[in-house]
Amino acid sequence: MAKAKSKKSASKKSKKSARKRSFFKRRWWLKPLLYLIAALSGALALYLSYCWLTLPDLEEVVSRTRQPSTTIIAENGNEIHTFGNSFSEVVYLEDLPYYVPAAVIDVEDRRFYRHFGFDVIGFSRAMFVNLLERRYAQGASTITQQVAKNLFLTSQKSIKRKVQELLLAFWLEHKFTKDQILTLYINRVYLGSGTYGLEAAANRYFGKSARDLSLKEAAVLAGMLKAPSRYNPISSAERAQERAKVVLQLMYDHGTITETEYQQALSEPLYDTAKYKVEGARHFADMVYHEVNAYIGERDQDLYVSTTLDQVLQQKVEALLKQTIQANKAKNVTNGAIVVLDHHGAIKALAGGVDYHKSQFNRAVQALRQPGSAFKPFVYITALQNGMSPYSVVEDRPITIGKWKPENYDKKYHGTVNLLEALAFSLNLATVDLSQKINLKDVIRNARRMGITTPLENTPALVLGASAVKVIDMAAAYASIANGGYAVFPYAITEIYSKDGLQLYGREVSEPQRILEPQVVSDITMMLEAVINRGTGRKAGIRVFAAGKTGTTQDHRDAWFVGFTKDYVVAVWLGNDDNSPMKGVTGGTLPAEVWQKVMMVTMET
């Protein structure tokens, strides 16, 4: 009996095994498929493990330091430029008007409070639209995914980064509440112009805290999330307005705001950021930024730097330089620099080139250019110090020194002339004759004391401006004449302070250092006034007192006009970066005309 049962049982097992073999035999592809699925699952598990293990150290990322921001400010308190990333104090959801976080959610992640870090519905919709339009038309990243990317990852597009983003998003959803994740997002999201977070952006674009944003302003900031540079209200108020309308429409369609709120927001004027921001002045801002460390050393906090810059004057000076270059391309004039100082050395305006975006090289403070006859006042000052007067005479005649045979610009000889005439009409031969009566070391010493910082060669050609100088140095040198004979050290920074108002540096006015005697100053001023009234600088003439000097180098490679009024000193240089000749441009033509226009502007401001 037991044997019969055993045989029956064995027979059933045999039949079952046969059926199983028959099943796999008929479906021969099933085993390889199962093996493949197992292998792929194993590979996927290994890849996910790899992505998780190669995530950046979370603690290190959270505590990572950032570059402190440095905001350069004009004399009137308006912002010139901010270097570094600007972060402001943390703001919490409960401190904000309801529509501020709501605008962000409506634009970026409508189902934020309903998904687990990955929006399946949103992802499916976006993929369908992208396939339909055959391009990347919609994104599907949730706010949680964006926090994961912004806090812990780079913007590099790769499968690994996307997988890590998802893993981090799930971790964030497990670790934090939805409100905490949203708080992280609004305080770290990039909103253009070096600003991170709603509070920094509200300060930058609207001059207020995020706690005080209007519905329209909230819509502008939320609209910028799509493309911070494109919808930036500073770079394009019109595009920012149009994008804000889209956001407001979404908020109305989603029932976040009422029709009354919607209509009121549409009619609200947008804050005019332009009048609180200095246009241009980037060469000036770069110069100031690089000087900050010299004043306070290395720093780990955000700074505000107050400067001497006159916003109106700066913007008009830059415009004048651009207009001059554009109008004289036929004369092969492609660049220039202008420096405006007051008599104490405060930089009121500085144009380091015609187009900062094309070249960040600052021709006002970095370029070394031959000054030509604009250097001659140092020679005449030395002669006055040696007992000569404006009416002492020299010979304007042919002269040869070794292999050097200088000439006058007009190729003529003017015989016996006094110093006033020689300087007023920029006579080269008379100046060389004068240099034979004085010591060139004294000329170099005077140039140094008056502000020239570049090497000066002790050669006969020095007196005709053969040694290269800086535009800002020439302005400082003439300022020491304009102020009655006192040393001038150009400066731009008046105060440096932290975000909480703590002063880190304040400029102190030191005792003036006399470098030129009053009589010498009086005589050279009269001589430089004659340059404008009846000499080579007549095109620089204005209706008030003015004194200055033209400068032109060989083959018209450099053209200068440097001079002063009772309030300002202006140095103008025109030329080409490649040192190619201009066509007929002398210091008494375009530079004198630009100088006159700049001085006219100073009398209007």
Image (cartoon, rainbow, N blue to C red):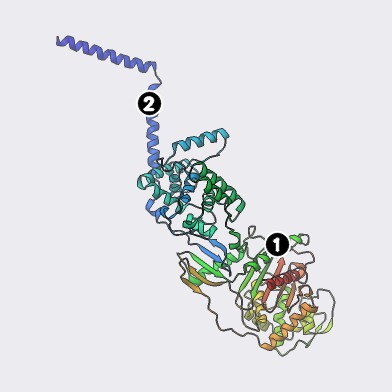
Relative placement, left or right, of 411 versus 182 is right
Residue 47: % across, % down: 40, 39
Residue 441: % across, % down: 66, 82
- Residue shown at 39% from the left, 19% from the top: 28
First in residue order: circle 2 vs circle 1: 2
- List the residue tagged with mark 1: 322
Say what amino acid the circle numbered 2 marks. Answer: Leu
Residue 378 picture quarter = bottom right
If the image is split into quadrants, where does the C terminus sit?
bottom right
Asked if one can make out residue 470 in the rendered structure from this viewpoint, the answer is: no
- Residue shown at 51% from the left, 75% from the top: 506
Residue 599 picture quarter = bottom right
Numbered tag placed on residue 275 in the rendering: none
Numbered tag placed on residue 34 in the rendering: 2
Asked if one can make out residue 549 in the rendered structure from this viewpoint, the answer is: yes
Classed neighbour count for the residue bearing mark 2: other residues with Cα under 10 Å, few (<14), some (14–19), many (≥20): few
Q: Is residue 175 above or below residue 394?
A: above
Residue 191: % across, % down: 52, 53
Say what amino acid the circle numbered 1 marks. Answer: Lys
- Residue shown at 76% from the left, 64% from the top: 582
For numbered disc 2, what is the local secondary structure?
helix
Relative placement, left or right, of 371 versus 301 is right
Q: Nearer the viewer, mark 2 or mark 1?
A: 1
